[in-house]
Structures are given as C-alpha cells and as structure tokens.
Image: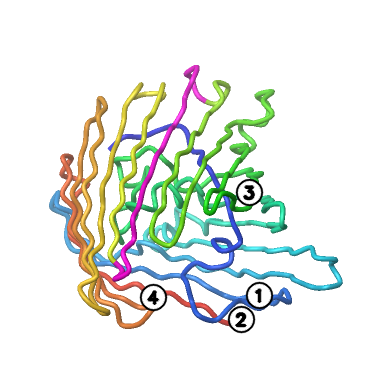
Amino acid sequence: MKKSIVSTAVFSLAMSSLMTTTVYAAPDPEDGRPLVYGNLNFGGVDKSAGDDWHVQAKEAAFGIRGLYKDEALNGLKFAYRLELEATKLINQSSGEYEMEVKNAVIALPTKYGTFVLAPRGESGQQRDLYGAVELFDVYEANRNGGIYDQPDEASGIIAYVSPKFGKGFQVVAANLNLGTTNDDNDEVSDANAIRLMYRDKKIFAGIGVVSISDKVVPTDNYNRVAASVKYSFEQGHQIGATYEQIEDHPGLGDFETIGVAGRYKINTTYELNLGHFSQSSDLENSATVLGLRRHFNERIYAYAEVADFDEPDLGHVALGLSVAFRGNP
C-alpha cells in the first residue's frame, strides 16, 4: 500500500452538501436550531491475508449542523457544522487514538457564491471528483483505499464556491494551510486548488488541480490532477469513472490511476455495486470490488462486500450494517 507524507485535500461546500449528509424529504430548520446527524457503519471483516473475522467500525461519525436565515440579517445567511469521528477510537481499544474532528465549518451562502471557513473539513475534491466511483462501504476511493493518492480531509481551508452558471457549471477555489508544523515556511498557502464542474439531473463532469508548495514536500512540483464523469439513470442505476494523474510525488514520482464503478438497482430493496481500480506506479496495484446492499429504509441497509487486490493483504470480505440518523438534539 502506498504511503504519502502529504496530507492535504481540496474542500468546498455548496449549501446543499453542507446541510445534508443524506438526502431527506424534510428540510432543515432555518432559525439556527442545531440538528444532530451521523452515520454508524459496522462491519465484520475477514482480511484475505488470513486474519480472523472481526467486527470493526468502518465509520462512526456524529455532529450538529444548522442554518441562520433571518430577515433581520438583511439577507445574510450563516451555516455551521461541527462533526466528530470516533472510528479509530472504537477500533483501538488500547486508547491510542482520541476523538477526531471531521468537520468544523462556517459557511456564508450568498447570491454571489458561498464563502467557507473551515479549520478542518472533508475534501470537496474527494466528494465531487472521486464520488463517481465511491460506491462501497469498506473500500474507499481515496488514499485510505491504497489506490488513489487523494486524501479525504484537509485543514486550514478558505474556499469559494461560485453560483451555477451556463445551466450547470460551477467553479470551486480553495486555499489550504496544513497545520502549525508548516506555519513557519514563509508561504501564504501550503496548497491551493481549483476545479470546474458541470452537473444536471443525469450527467456530472469535472476536472480539478491541486498544487502543493515545495516548502511542504521535498519535490518541486507536486501536482494532483483529477477528472471525473458520471451518468445517472432514471431507474437509479449509475456509471462513473475517475482519472487521477500525479506529478512529482515525494516517493513514487509520476504515476496515474483510473477507476470505473457502476451501480445497478435490482429493485427498491437491493442494489449491486461493481468497480475496478488500477494504478500505474512503482508500487503498481489494482483492485476489483463487488458490493451488495439490502435497504430496509432510506437510512438503514445491510451490505456484503468483496475486494480483490494485487496486494493480497489489502483484500477483504465484509458483512455489515449501516445506520444513518438525523433529528433534534
């Protein structure tokens, strides 16, 4: 599994993605009252390298979010989100880990776009450009999955999300600082990113570039380029692909990765997800992932997942249950 000393990502939040983790029919209140939300994904995993079956938390996150929309604010709106993750804490009974902050965000949505301040946040690059192939419950289409180099979180984020234009286009720009260990490097920005996206009811397409300062990594031009496309069918099926190109990675040099994944809605209860991912680098690796979900309602489903990697210690067989929640505190 490849490792990187860089832990940056691109983050952006349009109001729809900030205020909802999963799409629900009931809207959030607009008077600042917090809503509690979260997701628990617990799976029994059998590592193909020979490990015993063991139950692990694949995700255990909870938080609060809210929106102020008041006439007294002269049209200004303020949104906030604070989310904690206990996944590592749960899985390490030794107490080695503490609770992690997953999102700490204040956003100002206006008619001129959304402005975001986030000391800590999930990667918008990950969500938007890698979401086309992020269809699985144990395998992650980011650095944690061992194929792509894109991280899933970032820190020190100042971001701008443009309004939609041209019937579906949108631009996101972000400036990132990667923590106090890099504060004395004389750089205004440790990393910056920009991406252009187009989306309508069926089609999503996007391309993004992340550039990381040579004061942060021991290479001159560490750049990450990602391009993605996804098509959603009326029946709930979808097919998508994400291509990633890395320049001057501090350890692997130049390489590229491509993933293709699709979802087939068997009926209103069952869905089948299939993906293949391949990386061309000194640590060349590929994975094929198959997942089946059985939905009980819009917030609860059981799953079975099988992943086969070139590196066998990354493979797994998993059976699990995912429960999302949202409500008043």
Q: Is residue 229 above or below residue 8?
A: below
Q: Residues within 10 Å of mark 1 (few under 14, many from 20)?
A: some
Instruction: Identify the mark at residue 34; answer none if there is no mark.
Output: 1
| 229 inside magenta stretch | yes
Q: Nearer the viewer, residue 104 or 124?
A: 124
Q: x, y percentage for residue 299? A: 40, 77
Number of callouts:
4
Q: Secondary structure at mark 2?
A: loop
Q: Is residue 108 above or below residue 38?
A: above
The residue wearing badge 2 is 329
Quarter of the image for residue 227 reads top left
Label 2 sits on what residue type? Answer: Pro
Q: Residue furthest front?
A: 166
The residue wearing badge 3 is 162
Q: x, y percentage for residue 213? A: 56, 25
Marks 4,1: beta carbons within 8 A: no
Marks 3,1: beta carbons within 8 A: no
Which span is picked out in magenta? 217-236
Q: Residues within 10 Å of mark 4 (few under 14, many from 20)?
A: some
Label 3 sits on what residue type? Answer: Ser
Q: Secondary structure at mark 4?
A: strand
Q: Secondary structure at mark 3?
A: loop
Q: x, y percentage for residue 86? A: 47, 62
Q: CA distance from mark 3 to mark 1?
A: 26 Å
Marks 2,4: beta carbons within 8 A: no
Tell me which numbered mark, 3 or 1, is placed earlier along the sequence. 1
The residue wearing badge 4 is 323
Q: CA distance from mark 4 to mark 1?
A: 20 Å
Q: Nearer the viewer, residue 136 or 110?
A: 110
Between tags 3 and 2, which lies in front? 3
Residue located 23% across and 38% down the image: 278
